[in-house]
Structures are given as structure tokens and as C-alpha cells.
Amino acid sequence: MANAPHGGVLKDLVARDEHLRENLKAEAHTLPDIVLTERQLCDLELIMNGGFSPLEGFMNEADYKGVIDTLRLADGSLFPMPITLDVSREDIDRLSIAPGSRIALRDPRDDEALAIITVDDVYQPDQVKEAIEVFGADDPAHPAVAYLRNKVKEYYVGGKVQAIQPPTHFDYVALRFTPAELRAHFKKLAWRKVVAFQTRNPMHRAHRELTVRAARQRQANVLIHPVVGLTKPGDVDHYTRVRVYEAIMAKYPNGMGHLALLPLAMRMAGPREAVWHAIIRKNFGATHFIVGRDHAGPGKNSQGKDFYGPYDAQDLVMKYHEELQIEMVPFQMMTYLPSTDEYQPVDEVPKGVQTLDISGTELRRRLKTGAAIPDWFSYDAVVKTLRESYPPRLKQGFVVFLTGLHGSGKETIAKALQVTLNQQGGRSVSLLLGDNIRPELDTPFATTSEERSKNLQRMSFVAAELARAGAAVIFAPTVHSQAARDTVKNTILQQAGAGANFFAVNVATPLEHCEANDRKGVYARARKGEITGVAGVDEEFEPFERPQLTVDVTKQNIPEIVHSVVLLLETESLL
């Protein structure tokens, strides 16, 4: 039989509030509302369907502080991850958010009211402490810490929710199961033991061998339960991954495995995340849960070291084993033995026997370059699916990001580069300059840094979408700060898919030359105070850190500079 939910009762709020749905829906029309972020939407869906049992809403201050300090809710229940609804001071004032008020929570995709929250409290958290306690360090190299710093607002609203309706999905609907649905599925098939496998990456032969071995050793079935909400920036998109999972399910023994998708927003919190994942799988009915080496780890910190130890996650799950009541299955590193054409756990391979492995980094390299991927590593159907989403280098988009002072020559370089790339052919070439795109996308001398930031965000999004579609994008704004340049780069890397090839070119022409050759009189007007926001006059132009190429029109002519950019692209096999 399926495992008991965490806390003993599955908090299926959609089923609980079904008889109130029409009344709640009508009430939502009369209430102030919050349009959820993508992460809040994922959290709300799992609150409402019981995946986060015993939660019935977003955490109030008492629950939040308990989770941060002791991994426990105020009532003592084990729960390692803060689930919070963040709002700004402006939101609080505009919506009159206060204890007792009711707020409609809306889906950002279609504006539908999904739930109503009754506010318990509004509190200002110590987000630095949250980063240190939950993620191990206040280090922006951790994606969840970067998210906390850059996207999470300064206040949290706590309170229970009443469910109106779950979010509507249009992709892979047949593979989306609520905890109640998955439990009913296990009961129908008489699955008494279920080993759950968490993943945010494509699966290959080693993963199949690992999960089959774990199931057979325990006389159990396998639940492949991949995350399709927010994962680590730069991960393979979920559409590609699900096609891979569907292909690999055909390789399981008949009747052994089941594929279901989990709309979770991961935090990459290592040990705490592993305990959280175990609770979630318990709520979905699993009896066993595979915990990997460096489970849900985000990689390296700012000092180049791993955020978490390789077995910290397994140790923390074992620490709470009695309370979790789900059996942990340690992830065994599998390796291929060519002599017997099989996979074996690394620690079971006799000394001296040849083994073969391909790392994730090497796999990504082979996908990017079109190099062969052997059939001992993956299945033909899986490789075919991955190659469809990762075209060869000559078909991939890229972004050449040129920035420098006004009049530095970056626009001239950009236009000349566009001509050169058009001459070479093979892909469309898009030029993003202030004078050739719509004014609402770029206002060269916006009056505030906030306006400039918004303009840059819009233009970066456009550049990422064009690169995703396989275009060569030449993007030449004036970007004053290194933080803003890093934001542009991160937007491209996170949103451009296979086109996430980013090349930063520092056009380091001196201010004196720029000002002396300023035919438009921008610097003169800025020095008179007629316009503001001009780098080099009333705004500092920060030194450009870590560009792939630095050029200067006082030292090189335009053809030489363009040729150096082309050579840079050729070294990356993009031309």
C-alpha cells in the first residue's frame, strides 16, 4: 500500500474546497490580488494538491523561523524548506495587506484566480540569515541565493489558502499526477513498494540500470519523478527532458516503471533539499527514495569549492529517518564495463577491470560539437531527442555583446560585423542598436537608472529569444555597471537555450577620443546639464571585467576589429 502522507493526512485543498469553488471564485473578483511569480506558482500548486503536506498555505513568521532555525514548523513537524509568499512594501500599501485580509492569488500565465489567502501576518525576514541557514552561505554563486538577493521582495505574507482551482497545464497533461491521483494509480496496480527517483537532468543507461537494480533488490516498482518546474539555470529545458524520459521508459522491464512529472521549484539546497524531496515523495505515495551523491547540489561556490559535501544530503536524510518514514536508497555511482557490456556499481568492480564513463560536461561538449555519443552510454532514441534540441555548432545562435562609451565606435563595429556575418551566410543576423529598434525597447539616455535597467532587461530578453531561434545577434548598448553586464550575460545563458553562446567585447576607446569626435553633441549637452545619464560625465563607466575581447578604435581600425571578432567566433566553431 502507498506510504502515509507526511503528518498523517494528505492536505488536498482542491478536493477539500471543491464544494466552495463557485463562491470562492465569485469572491476572488471582489478582492485585491497578487499575480504570482513562477516560483510562487509552483509552490502554490504543491500546497493545494497536498505535495507539501502538512502545509495548508504560505508560512507565517512562527513557521518560517522554526524552519530556518530547526527544520521544523511551529507545531514541531519536520519541514526543512521555507515556503513563502514575498511582497514589496508597495504591494502591502497598495493592497492594504494586513492580518485578517483576504487576497486572491492569480496565475501569471492566464490571470485566473487559483486561491484565496487569509493573511495571518506580514513580516520582514532576515534574508541573509535565510541564505546562510538554508543554503549554507550568503554566496551569490548559489542560484537560490542569487534569486533571494535579486528577485525575492523584502516582506513575506503568511496565511492559509483556500483552493479555487489548480493551474491549467497544456503540456504533457497525461503525465501530470497529483498525490491523490498517483496514490490511486499505485493502489489500482497493487504496487506496495515504490522506489522514487528524482531528477532534473536527462536520463541515460546508467540511470536506468541504477533504478532497475534498486527496484529489484527491494522487490519494488519504480517511479520516475522528474522536476518540471524551476531547476538550476542552464539546465536542459523540461520539454526536451520529458521526451527523453518517455523514450527511456520503453527500456524498463514491462510493468516495472511509471513516469509522472513534478511541478516543483527547486532551490538546489543540498541536504535540506534532500529531506524536502523525501517528504514530497512520501506525500505522493512512494515508500523508498533514491538520494544521490551531492543530491540537489548547485556546484561550486565563489571560492571554487563544492557548496556541500558529497554525502551531506544522505547523512541528513538518515538523521531524520524515523520521522520521515520513507526508506532512503543511496545512489550508487554506476560505471560501464566494456568486457561484459554491462553497468556495475563502482565499488563492486574488481580491481584492474577496464571501465568507461562520460561526464556531464563531456556529454554537453559532444552535443554542442556534434561528436559521437556511444550506445553504451545512452540509447539511440535519447541521443536523437537531445540532438534535436542541441543542433550542431554551425546551426546554433549566439550573442556578440559590444559595450563601451557613447561614441566609442561600438555601433560602427556592430554594423560592420553584421555585414561580414551576412556575407558568410548560414544564419540570420540581428542587430540591436538604439537607433534601429523601437524606442520603447531602448531609451539611450533614460532619466533614471531604473529606466535604463528596465530597457536593458527588455533588450536582453529579445537578444536571448533571437539566439534561441538560431540567429546571430549583435547587441551594442551602453552599459555602465559590471552588475548590469553580468545580468545581460545571465539572461542569455539562462534563456537562450542552445543559442546560449555569449561573447563579451569591451570597446575600450578612451573618453577623450569619444568626446572629441562626438558629432551629435551628447557630451557637450551632458556637461551643460541638459541631459543626464551619460557615462563618463555624470555617470561612472565601470571597468569591464572578464571580456573575451578588448578593442580600441584608436589602436585598431574597424576591419581589424571585425576580423578579431570573427576569429573569436571561429575558435568556438560557430562559423
Image (tube, rainbow, N blue to C red):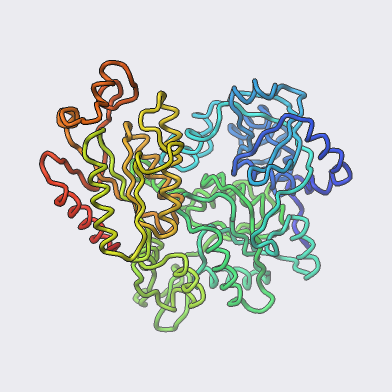
What quarter of the picture does the C terminus occupy? Answer: bottom left
Toward the bottom, the furthest residue is 340
Q: Is residue 305 left or right of residue 78?
A: left
Image position of 364 with respect to 318: above or below: below
| Image side of residue 16 versus residue 45, left or right | right
Name the one closer to the observer, 336 or 29. 29
Q: Which of the pair 174/373 is nearer the observer? A: 174
Expressed as whole percent of the image width and height from the top left, the position of residue 355 reads 38, 74
Image quadrant assignment for residue 224: bottom right
Residue located at (65% from left, 20% from top): 93
Image quadrant where one finds the N terminus: bottom right
| The residue positioned farthest toward the right in the image shown | 19
Q: Residue 12, how many percent across, how many down?
A: 79, 48
Q: Is residue 8 visible?
A: no
**Residue 391 in sight in this render:** yes
Q: Is residue 518 left or right of residue 52?
A: left
Residue 5 % position (x, y): 75, 51
